[in-house]
Amino acid sequence: MTPSSRLILLPVAAVAVCAPAQAMVYLSVEQAQKLMFGEAALTPLLITLTPAQAAQVEADSGVHVFSPSLRVWKAADGGYFMVDAVIGKHDLITYALALGADGKLRQVEILEYREAYGGEVRNARWRAQFAGKQHGDSLELGQDIQGISGATLSCEHLTAGIRRMLATYALVVRGR
Amino acid sequence: MNSLASKPAALSLLAAALLSAGAAAAADPVHTDAATAQKLEQQIEQMAQQLEAMKAELQQLKAQNEALAAQQRQQAAQVQQQAVQAQQQAAQVEQAVAQVQAQPQRGGISPDLSLWGYGEIYYTHPVHVPALTQADLARAVFGIGYRFDDRTVFNSEFEVEHAVSSASDKGEFEVEQFYVDHQLASWAAVRGGLFLMPFGLLNEHHEPTSYFGVQRNFVETLVIPSTWREGGFAFHGDTEAGIGWDFGLTTGVNLANWDPNPENPLYRTALDLENSGAAPLQATHQELSLANAQHLSQYVSLSYKGIPGLLAGAAVFTGNAATPTSPPHLPDQRVTLWEAHARWTPGAADLSAVYARGGITNSAAYNLANAGGSNPMPSKFWGYYLQGAYTVWRHHGYRLAPFVRWERYDMGAGYAGIAPGFGPVPMGLAADGQPWPQPHDRVWTYGTNFYLNPHVVVKADYQSFQTNSDFTRFDFGLGLNF
């Protein structure tokens, strides 16, 4: 096969693969809520961190608070659903957390991942490492959470983001 | 409200009338005849009727009152419901605002623009030849990315090597990556442009914070020519199960870039060796700089990352190369490179291994035409390393990870067409009075990476060369990545 004829195959293959699915967005907030809490009622909570609270969260988690606005829902069973975003390598990763009434992390889901590299954080076994973790537990990549080779920064930043959210939960959200 | 207020007044009037009538009857016994009694009865009867009427009116008023109260309650409920709705709407708005605000800010110019960079500075001291000690701003790289939409992103990296790039300096200014990546489905994307080849552990992740040792290992420099990039198209993706795949059609190797007979050795130190472009693919890959694209190459790469902490993968690249123009009418030459790699990071440990092997076919005619040259074209080259690192200390983002690496490489593991009486490496001494260096070696590296944070690393190592023992060196370096 000549190079030019092989080149022609490329767009053909592209069209064959191209699906109308909405790429990059793996789960919407609503889908994640349903996945994590089923049909249980979720009530949005309006929480904006005061500068003092943000400083407290930063001191506790060792992670910078990018935004004081929280996206938190309280579940009828006393659990919480939280949505947060971190920067992977250059671009945003949006993820959701489900916390049980006992404050333990039940589940982590990746909602949106946009980068050309490092999408392996979607891997279920990687995310499963966070299950059962709670505020106060050590949560360091390479120590408590195994990284993914080639996706180190995404793993690092997601782990830090989750540490920050657990601190936010414990210091501000719990009991609301 | 008026009718309700007047009700007690009406009742008291009625009572007063009854009392006064009774009092009048008792006060005048003379007139207590039957007619009077009848009249009184009639009056009482009338009054009783009036009383009944008033009772009815009162009932009606009560009913009205209750209806009004119910109406009011209903209105209040409606108001309350509206308030709840308004609150919910406010909550939704807040959520939407929070969604926007909760996103960490990127760039300062546009949220779609991303900027990044990395770089490294070396100090390298060959312990047996201190005169060749060097310090170098080896690379300063800045990256610019732009997101066109949710599916399409552009990434580029620009690199200055050795601090100064000019006609009289060794430095280079080069475009290291320049591609558009378009997501087709959650598991597949297409990439076009100048991009990094998915080979080994280092090539795609070559930032100084990503590897152990001041400088890159020899296997992934001399066999896999990192930072190896080609121009072309690729399909790639990864599944949720952890399987990564990547295949593409790219530019390939131009063997016309091979120098069969340099007057002096291409390298005299380990640092030279990495920078000189002496290795087979380092010397001949084209970096999309007016690349000869008469022949295209293809590659496929597969990896598995399904178990946290484990990575295993392999890749193969093959294609006809552009052949040297002198002598003319050389046969077609194919260049192939394959590799396998694995990395396991259980807890504080970090274990990795890479094996890579390449070949160039039909090199005999070329080597015979250049018989006696100091640098014949090899037909085989390979290398492997085993490396272990361990995080011994970490505190508030600081991390200390010593490592040890054993590697072997052979840039000239096989030759074809070496004329009788000649070897692949010239006998005797080079112009500088030293023997010619050998294209193979076994190297132990002991060192440590000390991370100030995940983005800044200070490194030191000692490398012991068993064949080219003059290359043995101490290195110190600073690397960063953001």
Image (tube, grey):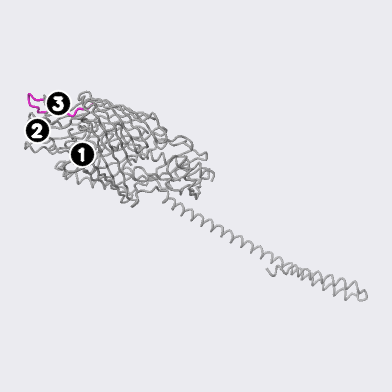
Q: Position of residue B432 (x, y in %)?
A: 13, 29
Mark 2 neighbour density, 10 Å: few (under 14) some (14–19) many (20 or more):
many
| Vertical order, A172 against B444 (above or below) | below
Determine whether, in the image, residue A18 is placed left or right of residue B372. right
User: What subunit carries mark 3?
Assistant: B
Toward the right, the furthest residue is: B30
Q: Is residue A12 left or right of residue A76?
A: left
The label on residue B434 is: 3
Instruction: Give the residues in magenta.
Output: B408-424
Residue A145 pos. (x, y %): 41, 34
- Chain bearing tag 1 is B
Mark 3, mark 1: which one is toward the viewer?
Answer: 3
Q: Nearer the viewer, mark 2 or mark 1?
A: 2
Q: CA distance from mark 2 to mark 1?
A: 24 Å
Name the mark on residue B366.
2
Q: Is residue B414 magenta?
A: yes
Residue kind at label 2, given as amino acid type = Tyr
| Callout 1 amino acid | Gln
Residue A4 percent coordinates (x, y): 16, 45
Percent x, y for residue B185?
Answer: 32, 45
The disc label shown at residue A55, or none: none
Circle 1 residues within 10 Å: few <14, some 14–19, many ≥20: some
